[in-house]
Image (spheres, rainbow, N blue to C red):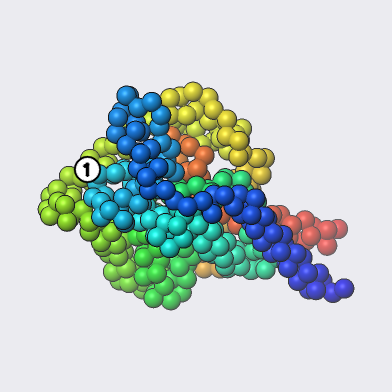
Amino acid sequence: MHKKNYKKVFFYIIIFISIIKLVSFIVINRQFFLQRFSPEYISRLYSESQYVLGEKSKGGIGDDGLYAYAGYYYLFQGGDVSNVNFEHPPLGKYLIGFSILFFGNENVINIIYIIFLLILVYKLGLRLLRDRLLSALSVAVLSFDPIFLDHLIRSMLDLPFTLFFTGGIYFFLKGLEKDKFLFHSFVLWGMAFSTKFFPAYFLIYVYSLGIVLIYQRNLIKPFLLGSITVPVIYIALHISFFFYHPSLIEFLRHKKWMLAWFTGSPIIIGNIWRFIFTGNYLDSTRKMASDKHWNTVIPLIVILAVASFKKIFILNKKYQDIFVIYGLCIFYLIYLSFFTGGMQKFLMPIYPLLIILALNNLLFIYSIITSWKKRN
């Protein structure tokens, strides 16, 4: 069989295995997608939780339950977004509310997220790796990742945030060729920033501006105009806030309050690297905990991705996509290392990018080995 035919066969095998893995996971955990959302139960759970009763609470509510209640409260009860879970912007919770509205279940929308995320990962992989087989392999690695699979069955914000963040990067790369895609990029980054509190976006914005200055100075104007989209989307999604508090000053005070809340969150320097290499981490009380979703693939991918520096610091348009992705990952890892508690789920937004970088480095290593063999 011809080499191209072999690659084509392996491509379809990898895609098929990835689909089977996702479908089987969904079928095995179908109760999380078929169980009807109960407003009475979740409302009672919230009213008796630590967010209402404080230390008097006998039970508690997890983040997934909190976001599900917030989505229901925002969409079905016209609730003020500053009343429930003010710590994070409302978009992700609105989307949970829409999942409840259309599917009667808060988790079904996660299936839509993961499908679009895998498509984006494939397209990003194809753009950077220029190889369908390796692009399919990047999809397979993500399809089998236990952290992403776990988020499929929970109404969390990390999966939609990862989708919007990754989409923003994909269209930013396309925008370096055609300026109209810069607008798409900022729309998706605006959606990401409106889903989860993300102060590192400022670093990413400055880095992206630097990329434009290095590679495409003629795109400065569309870049700056497109970036206005981010605050516009953010403010528009807080429209219900202004119904209850018709004051821009009050809105700014609310944002200051939100920022103050997060600055009070514990910063554990280097905690993310403890998780990456060992699967253990210090929780918010600084007690050692173990993550059941950790596996040896995670440190391998991170090492291979970070080791990509041998090829990507060539400031040549031929390598600009890899340079952009690598820089974003490094900035994000610095942010996780020194300005957060380093929880394992914080790695999710750049994990698809790390997978692609790792495969790119493997491809680079393979090319060195094959060229060395030819010379000898």
Relative to 12, say whether 346 is above or below. above
Quadrant of the image occupied by residue 269 = top left
Quadrant of the image occupied by residue 284 = top left
Find disc 1 in the rendering and name its residue: 256
Residue 168 % position (x, y):
43, 62
Q: Quadrant of the C terminus?
A: bottom right
Asked whether the viewer can see residue 231, the reply is: no
Q: Which residue is painted at 16% across and 52% down in the image? A: 244
Residue 48 % position (x, y):
34, 33
Q: Is residue 356 left or right of residue 74?
A: right
Q: Which residue is painted at 78% across and 73% down in the image? A: 4
Q: Is residue 108 left or right of residue 9?
A: left
Amino acid type, residue under disc 1 in the picture: Lys
Give the structural element (helix, strand or loop) at label 1: helix
Query: Please, which residue is most extreme toward the front here?
Result: 40
Residue 308 % position (x, y):
60, 52
Q: Is residue 48 left or right of residue 36?
A: left
Q: Which residue is painted at 54% across and 49% down in the image? A: 32
Q: Quadrant of the N terminus?
A: bottom right
